Amino acid sequence: MGILTRIRRGTRWERLALPAIDTDRLRIAPLHADMAEEVRRLTDDPAITGAVDFLPERVGIEDARGLIRAADTGRDVFLGLHEREDRSLVGIVGAHLRALEAIEIGYWIGGSARGRGYGAEGVGAVVRALAGAYPRRAVVAECRPENVASWNMLHGLGFRPTGDGGQRPGRKLMVWDVRDAPQGHSAGSGGTARPDGARAR
């Protein structure tokens, strides 16, 4: 099968869907329409909008609804990271089908939840779920090297720079390698993944 055939098959026919995932502290599941205001409150933060290139400077309710509706395309999905004790939304992880048999991930964490390890726990769990569900696709991320916190977090999860620049200015392309990933609960993958994709409760 030629590479163009594989690209077309992946981009046209394959759909991105992820299960709900339970980790030690988080319940991770696709965003739902009734979460739009919660998504807006979390995301309308200059520290987030200034770092995520596709977000507007101010995030309104329609922008939040657009993130949630992205799953309808089958190429993008945004998952909420919910604190298991109080069900509060502490972060969002996005996964996006890309050509050349790749899935790109990105994430943002709410201000009050930063520095508590939610990013590593949530992103680590999502990456492992993606690798299991789409074994023929590479999991990649783009990051600015000067964004030391994100760079170190991704490196700790098993992402390594490819030496190539990313599609966005100033970013470097990183690819996940299971051989470099932490094992067990420390990888943020403890708990269960529900294949039905239902919202975690």
Image (cartoon, grey):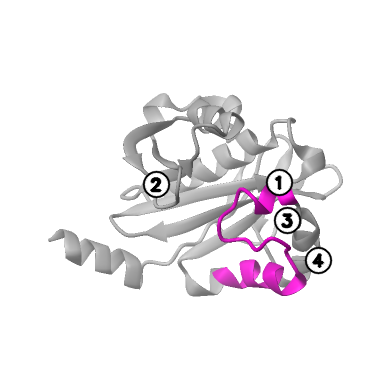
Q: Name the front one of labels 3 and 4.
A: 3
The quadrant of the picture occupied by the C terminus is bottom right
Judge whether residue 34 can be spotted in this image.
Answer: yes
Q: Quadrant of residue 190?
A: top right
> Circle 4 is placed at which residue position?
37
Q: Which mark is residue 43?
A: 3
Kindly report the distance in space between the C-alpha atoms of the residues bearing marks 4 and 2.
Answer: 31 Å
- At 61% from the left and 43% from the top, the residue drawn is 192
Q: Position of residue 180 (x, y in %)?
A: 41, 25
Q: Is 199 displayed left or right of 172 in the figure? A: right
Q: Are marks 3 and 2 in contact (CB under 8 Å)?
A: no
Mark 4 element type? helix
Kindly report the distance in space between the C-alpha atoms of the residues bearing marks 3 and 2.
Answer: 23 Å
Mark 1 element type? helix
Task: Looking at the image, tell me whether mark 3 or mark 4 is earlier in sequence order.
Answer: 4
Kindly report the distance in space between the C-alpha atoms of the residues bearing marks 1 and 4.
Answer: 18 Å
Task: Looking at the image, tell me whether mark 2 or mark 1 is earlier in sequence order.
Answer: 1
**Which contiguous range is marked in magenta?**
46-70
Residue 129 vs residue 110, the one in the foreground:
110
Q: Which mark is residue 47?
A: 1
Q: Is residue 62 magenta?
A: yes
Residue type of the residue flagged with mark 4:
Glu
Q: Which mark is residue 170?
A: none
